[in-house]
Image: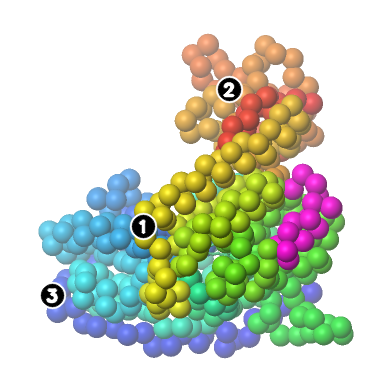
Amino acid sequence: MGYVIPKNFLNLNKVLKTKYKEKYKGIRARTDSGSYWITTFGCQMNKADSERMAGILENLGYTKAEDEFNADLVLYNTCTIRDNAEQKVYSYLGKQAKRKHKLPELKLIIAGCLAQQEGESLLRKVPELDLVMGPQHVNNLGNLLERVDLGNQVVATEEIFISEDITNARRESSICGWVNIIYGCNERCSYCVVPSVRGREQSRYPGAIKDEIISLAKNNYKEITLLGQNIDAYGRDLPGHTMSGRELTTLTDLLYYIHDIEGIKRYRFATSHPRYFSKRLIQACYELDKVCEHFHIPFQSGNNEILRMMSRGYTIEKYKEIIDNIRILMPNASITADAIVAFPGETSKQFEDTLSLISEIGFDLVNTAAYSPRPNTPASKWGNQLPENIKKERLNELNEMVEKTSRERNKRYLNTKEKILIEGFNPKNPSQLMGRTRTNRLTFVEIPDLNQQINLISTELSQLIGRSPSQRLNFVGIPNNQQLNLIGTELNVRINKVRSFSLSGKICN
Ligand code: SAM
Ligand code: SF4
């Protein structure tokens, strides 16, 4: 079934603020577009946004610069989730601002969450900036640059309907692609700046998502990660309800809808919110064989009182029930999460509840952070902030626990046979292939020696791989004459080494 995007959905951008740049008046942009450099801070959503902006720039004739300090256009796609991420951006900007004094044609752009948070005030802090643009304006980069080329300093931070992206993103990986399915967040976690910088939830229409994935499949992509700040909220802003009264289009429905796309072997999704994570979704992940057994479900704290203060909307009991239900159907699933320590007022006992939860659940990985007060968030105004030394101590203790648990969890892979989707070569050791298990464990794979007898590993493996005496990597066609190489194929690999955050193994039958 096709989904129709209403015409007005594409055209609701409001008028942008523009300010004439007196200082650079008369200096026009070069007519050949020149080179660009993008530095991305923060989460996968930002990385996906940067890939789309790189696609737009290349479409406009820019080429990727070799070096940040030689580029004609420099774009910092920023994060403001914690204070240290924010400070880093200012130091990068300072260096480029100095460069711009010698090279007024340099285009300097700040995008992402810091741009949205600070808006026009960034122009006072860094007058050399040409463009300040919030995350909702990513797909409009081309239009905004036109205004910059006319000599304007542009601030684009109004909340808008995000227009569909018609330019192909320039993706970092040629095998794994990120696809945004919902922008923004309607939650109000008391510590989090995301809703104020990324705006209200906006789900993309399933038809547009499917078209993007089909086009990725045609370009040989094999793995798709669906992205959203609160991905379980997908579809609640889209029209329609079923006879039983639930929303017509949910993440679960979307997974069924895209599952049959030819060429795509794996689907993942992130980030899940325990408040909305449904049994129906778990059932779908179990039934749909392309959906990987990997769930990223942040719990933030192991203590119910802290969860209440965070306004998270679930209890630890509910969280454990979700994990139990996943493990009933998919016992080997990997479970990863995010956690915050030293939230205002957190006692040592409450902190220990977080440590206990990590060891009880046996997480595969937990992204950790010490609480950082963010502007315009309720928790930042409370009087019971904890001192820096406690934050550091708790974070160190938590990290030790996470590493220990991950190492323990990884032991289950030893001597098992895993399907690894090969993404490329190990950049630190090009004599190894690199890929991931379905559970998202990074795995290094020894490249087989040609003298060794190897059998066909999968029906898609059509080449043997080896090295010449000069150590050049050679691909040798096997009799069926197909010319596929190993990148993008799923190989059976026997795991012979486990570390805290990665595995190694050899190709097997
Ligand atoms: N939407 C996801 C969720 O609800 O769990 C998280 C998205 S947020 C961009 C990523 C992570 O940053 C959060 O899970 C949280 O652990 C961390 N984070 C957010 N605000 C923070 C703050 N003020 N201080 C420290 N960590 C924070
Ligand atoms: Fe932030 Fe909470 Fe939204 Fe996640 S769900 S992005 S933590 S407000």
Q: From the image, tell me which residue sits under label 1.
A: 388
Sequence-wise, the earlier of marks 3 and 2 is 3
Whether residue 16 is visible: yes
Frontmost of labels 3 and 1 is 1
Q: From the image, tell me which residue sits under label 2.
A: 474
C-alpha distance separating marks 1 and 2: 54 Å
Q: Is mark 3 in CB contact (under 8 Å) with mark 2?
A: no
Whether residue 36 is visible: no
User: Neighbour class for label 1 at 10 Å: few (<14), some, many (≥20)?
Assistant: few
Front-lying residue, 190 or 181: 190
| Residue placed furthest toward the right | 243
Residue at the image position 54 percent from the left and 77 percent from the top: 188
Q: Magenta residues, as a range?
A: 317-333
Frontmost of labels 3 and 2 is 3
Q: From the image, tell me which residue sits under label 3.
A: 23
C-alpha distance separating marks 3 and 2: 57 Å
The image quadrant of residue 284 is bottom right
C-alpha distance separating marks 3 and 1: 42 Å
Three-letter amino acid code at the position of disc 3? Lys
Residue at the image position 65 percent from the left and 82 percent from the top: 237
Q: Does the magenta stretch include residue 106?
A: no
Frontmost of labels 1 and 2 is 1
Q: Is mark 2 within 8 Å of ligand 1?
A: no
> What is the quadrant of the N terminus in the image?
bottom right
Left or right, 447 with respect to 167, comes to: right
Front-lying residue, 171 or 40: 40
Q: Where is residue 465 in the image (x, y as percent from the top left)?
A: 64, 23
Sequence-wise, the earlier of marks 1 and 2 is 1
